[in-house]
Amino acid sequence: MSTAALRYAGALAAVVLAPAVVVAAVGAGVFFSTPPADRAVLARVLREQTPLLVVAAVLVVLVAGLLLAAALSRYVGPARRLTGDVRVMLDANPEHRVTPSGPAELRALATALNDLAERHSNVRRDVAEHV
């Protein structure tokens, strides 16, 4: 497994588990801050509602994971294409230009890269003419 994939998996695990950790911490705080007599009632209610709480926790984790996956796919795919286009410009075809795609930030970056490539191309042409 590559380093990038491990980082992606770690970020996914952190974001998916974060809501569960917060809910557990809040629940523990509520449980231990209640008087002992009420704590027994609360424990009984929690035992009776365990299946519902488990389903709710799974749904929260699932929704958090889906939201993270959607956000990452929106940025990661276009960023990888942008990297590939820049590699083509650097290694094979200096006249190649990046096709802006993805979110506004990446489209702006692609436009700036195209401007930079155009200026570099003009400078190379000027130097070739002078030589």
Image: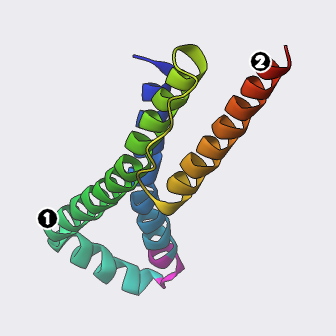
Disc 1 is placed on an element classified as helix
Residue ID for mark 2: 128
Q: Position of residue 26 (x, y in %)?
A: 48, 72
Which mark identifies residue 51? 1
Instruction: Name the image quarter holding the C terminus.
Output: top right
Q: Do the residues under discs 2 and 1 have CB atoms within 8 angstroms?
A: no
In front: 129, or 80? 129
Looking at the image, tell me whether mark 2 or mark 1 is earlier in sequence order.
1
The structure residue drawn at horizontal position 50% and vertical position 30%, both measured from the top left corner, is 96
Q: Please, what is the three-letter code of the amino acid marked with disc 1?
A: Pro
Left or right of 18 in this view: 43:
left
The type of residue carrying mark 2 is Ala
Q: Is residue 10 visible?
A: no
Q: Is residue 79 visible?
A: yes
Magenta span: predominant SS is helix
Question: Disc 2 and disc 1: Cα gap in Å?
Answer: 75 Å
Q: Residue at x 79, y 27 (%)?
A: 126
Q: How is the image coloured?
A: rainbow
Q: Residues within 10 Å of mark 2 (few under 14, many from 20)?
A: few
Q: Tell me residue 71's x, y (percent).
A: 39, 56
Is the residue marked by circle 1 packed among few (<14), some (14-19), or many (20+) residues within 10 Å?
few
Disc 2 element: helix
Question: In the image, is residue 22 above or below residue 71?
Answer: below
Disc sitting over residue 90 in the figure? none
Highlighted range, magenta: 30-35
